[in-house]
Image (spheres, rainbow, N blue to C red):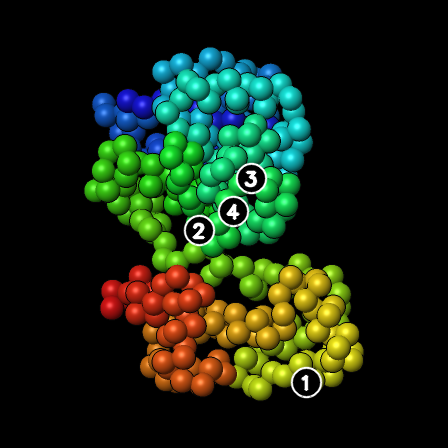
């Protein structure tokens, strides 16, 4: 039996904790317990997450004999990364465990402890640039759902912690048992591609500039049209030069790249519906041919159109 310790803090993301715990617990059937799970916090007692969910914890303790230390993420991760007591504890106990793991923005806590220096790591897509800026010694992977570098594991946003947990189970007890847990929970054993496939429509929701929101909404609703800078600037009631500058500044992405990514995300949705041939999908999303669609899809999502479709329909 392997012992797993989770560390949480006020305003933690509850799914970062509960998701992996449920996955690990999927192997803890009667008489065959494979994981012993402990939830730790600085002082013990009840800790409340950002959703209002309270979790009963125990105070920080010696982790000798534990297999993994997992740091969850959430709104409170920034404050946790500045907590000298917590950081010192993680630095000390990292020597007692076999694996160090972070879920989502829990990566910032490991980074603050200096435990990711020189290593590959990832985090929530919205925080990737911030992670690289604050901790330049980390080799940030901007597309992975999760990353393993030696004895250290990091995951992308929230639900990616479930993908990472399944991979840990596969390491511990084999892929067959990991697949069984995934089937029981009705989740992917291994999701296709990287986290870029989940981000572009979310970017639109976070735009503060109303004029740019209007342009992005038009792009999303009309990907098949010829979406030039001149046209998008007119929709936004801005000059082409000002539109291009403001757009790139706010989205950290050029208008042309946003159009391309939006078209690919629309193509992804059409693939999931399994109703149209690739040539028709290409036309529907404003891409010149099925060959170009396949090439761009593979480049952007790190998975081919056929592989992606197979995850939904088996071929």
For the residues labelled 2 and 1, say whether their Cβ atoms are less than 8 Å apart.
no
The residue tagged 4 is 140
- Kindly report which numbered mark, 4 or 1, lies closer to the viewer in this rendering: 4
- Kindly report which numbered mark, 4 or 2, lies closer to the viewer in this rendering: 4
Q: Answer left or right for 45 relative to 153.
A: right
Q: Which mark is residue 144?
A: 2
Mark 3–mark 1 Cα distance, whole angstroms, equals: 42 Å
Report the front residue among 186 and 100: 100
- Mark 3 Cα within 10 Å, few/some/many (few <14, many 20+)? some
Residue 161: image location, x then y, percent: 44, 42
Which residue is at a point 41% across and 18% down the rendered structure image?
A: 96
- Mark 1 Cα within 10 Å, few/some/many (few <14, many 20+)? few
Q: Residue 84's image quarter? A: top right
Q: Secondary structure at mark 3?
A: loop
Quarter of the image that includes the C terminus: bottom left
Report the front residue among 103 and 230: 230
Q: Height in image: 307 above or below 223?
A: above
Which residue is at a point 36% across and 58% down the rendered structure image?
A: 192
Which residue is at a point 43% across and 56% down the rendered structure image?
A: 194
Q: Secondary structure at mark 4?
A: strand
Q: Secondary structure at mark 2?
A: loop
Q: Which mark is residue 231?
A: 1
The residue tagged 3 is 137
Q: Height in image: 296 above or below 276?
A: above
Mark 3–mark 2 Cα distance, whole angstroms, equals: 18 Å
Which residue is at a point 34% across and 36% down the rendered structure image?
A: 168
- Kindly report which numbered mark, 4 or 3, lies closer to the viewer in this rendering: 3
For the residues labelled 4 and 2, say whether their Cβ atoms are less than 8 Å apart.
no
Mark 4–mark 1 Cα distance, whole angstroms, equals: 36 Å
Which one is earlier in the sequence, the residue at label 3 or at label 2?
Answer: 3
């Amino acid at each position: 039996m392997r012992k797993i310790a989770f560390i949480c803090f006020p305003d933690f993301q509850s799914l970062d904790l509960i998701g992996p715990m449920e996955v690990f617990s999927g192997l803890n059937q009667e008489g065959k317990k494979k994981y012993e799970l402990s939830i730790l916090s600085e002082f013990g007692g009840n800790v409340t997450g950002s959703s209002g969910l309270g979790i009963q914890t125990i105070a920080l303790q010696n982790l000798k004999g534990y297999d993994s230390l997992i740091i969850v993420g959430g709104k409170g991760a920034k404050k946790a990364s500045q907590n000298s007591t917590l950081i010192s504890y993680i630095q000390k106990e990292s020597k007692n465990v076999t694996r160090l793991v972070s879920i989502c923005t829990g990566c910032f806590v490991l980074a603050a402890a200096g435990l990711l220096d020189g290593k590959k790591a990832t985090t929530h897509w919205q925080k990737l640039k911030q992670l690289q800026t604050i901790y330049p010694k980390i080799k940030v992977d901007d597309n992975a759902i999760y990353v393993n570098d030696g004895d250290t594991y990091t995951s992308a946003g929230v639900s990616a912690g479930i993908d990472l947990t399944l991979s840990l189970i596969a390491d511990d007890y084999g892929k067959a048992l990991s697949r069984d847990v995934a089937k029981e929970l009705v989740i992917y054993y291994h999701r296709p591609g990287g986290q870029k496939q989940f981000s572009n429509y979310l970017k639109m929701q976070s735009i503060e500039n109303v004029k740019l929101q209007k342009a992005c909404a038009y792009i999303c609703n009309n990907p098949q049209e010829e979406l030039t800078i001149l046209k998008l600037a007119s929709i936004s009631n801005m000059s082409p030069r000002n539109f291009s500058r403001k757009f790139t500044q706010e989205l950290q992405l050029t208008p042309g790249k946003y159009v391309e990514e939006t078209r690919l995300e629309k193509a992804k949705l059409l693939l999931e519906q399994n109703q149209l041939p690739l040539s028709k999908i290409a036309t529907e999303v404003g891409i010149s041919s099925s060959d170009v669609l396949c090439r761009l899809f593979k480049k952007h999502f790190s998975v081919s159109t056929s592989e992606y479709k197979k995850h939904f329909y088996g071929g």
